[in-house]
Image (cartoon, grey):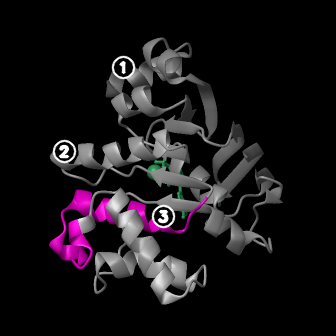
Amino acid sequence: MITLQNVHKRFGQNHVLRGVDARVDNGEVVCIIGPSGSGKSTILRCINGLESYEEGSIHIDEKMVDRQSTHLRQIRQEVAMVFQRFNLFPHRTALENVMEGPIYVKGLPRTQARDAATHYLEKVGLADKMSSFPQQLSGGQQQRVAIARALAMEPQAILFDEPTSALDPELVGEVLAVMADMARAGMTMIVVTHEMAFAKEVADRVLFFDQGVIVEEGKATDILNAPQHPRTQDFLRRVL
Ligand code: ADP
Ligand code: MG
């Protein structure tokens, strides 16, 4: 359902994406791994139209993603994003943060938005934190609110950009557990992560990204246990 063909992206002279081809099917969980600066965030941002690209094409089903596209608003509803920093509204409660999208983007009546937000906060294990403000929550809880906010849009796919990188180590597990539940429930997910154990357990496929291209891809266990490309081998030696 998400298809990338020969995608190129430059920031000035910096040729960041150099011909990316990929396909993510419905219900698939794909982890993207690779060194810092290789273009992992940029590719996610291109997929949901937060960044433009110059060459190639990105499609969500039959809809092409590009800055001029009339589909862009719709694409942002269908493809949600969870960031490293949770970007919650500080003066709104967890419940209000999750209600925001359904009300203002999807146009749901307040009562329906409240029901949806309650449902998804329960799903991420925060039934008892609905009326807490972000600063009263741990980083792991804030990230789970951010995930509930993405789920409340009822998207077709969710993109995660290093969702646990900003967390204290003891809070990483609770967020990964919620993500593993979503994967089991059939959500289509693209996850940029350094959590190799998560990738091994949860991902259907792993893409190794380096210098703006996919250097190697395959089943998570194959890529992580027996990488073929020297650049993948070198990267994994450094992170594992
Ligand atoms: P990764 O997520 O793999 O660490 P990024 O996609 O963030 O890599 O960045 C890839 C390259 O693009 C880097 O060289 C980075 O400096 C550059 N870059 C990213 N965003 C911007 C931007 N908004 N303006 C200019 N350069 C950018
Ligand atoms: Mg990044």
| Nearest the eye: 144 or 217 | 144
Q: Nearer the viewer, mark 2 or mark 1?
A: 2
Say above or below: 131 vs 19: below
Mark 3 residue type: Ala
CB atoms at circles 2 and 1 under 8 Å apart?
A: no
Give me the residue at 43% from left, 14% from top: 225
Give me the residue at 69% from left, 74% from top: 73
Residue of label 3: 150
Residue of label 2: 169
Q: Which mark is residue 237?
A: 1
Q: Nearer the viewer, mark 3 or mark 1?
A: 3
Write down the region rendered in magenta.
Answer: 128-155
Give me the residue at 26% from left, 63% from top: 126
Mark 1 residue type: Arg
Q: Residues within 10 Å of mark 1 (few under 14, many from 20)?
A: few
Magenta stretch: dominant secondary structure = helix
Q: Position of residue 25 (x, y in %)?
A: 68, 40
Query: Which is nearer the N-term, disc 2 or disc 1?
Result: 2
Queried whether the magenta region covers residue 137, the answer comes back as yes
Q: Secondary structure at mark 1?
A: helix
Which part of the image, by quadrant, shows the C terminus? top left
Q: Is residue 63 left or right of residue 189?
A: right
Regarding residue 58, the answer to whether it shows in the image is yes
Say above or below: 211 vs 157: above
Query: Which is nearer the N-term, disc 3 or disc 1?
Result: 3
Q: Position of residue 88 (x, y in %)?
A: 35, 74
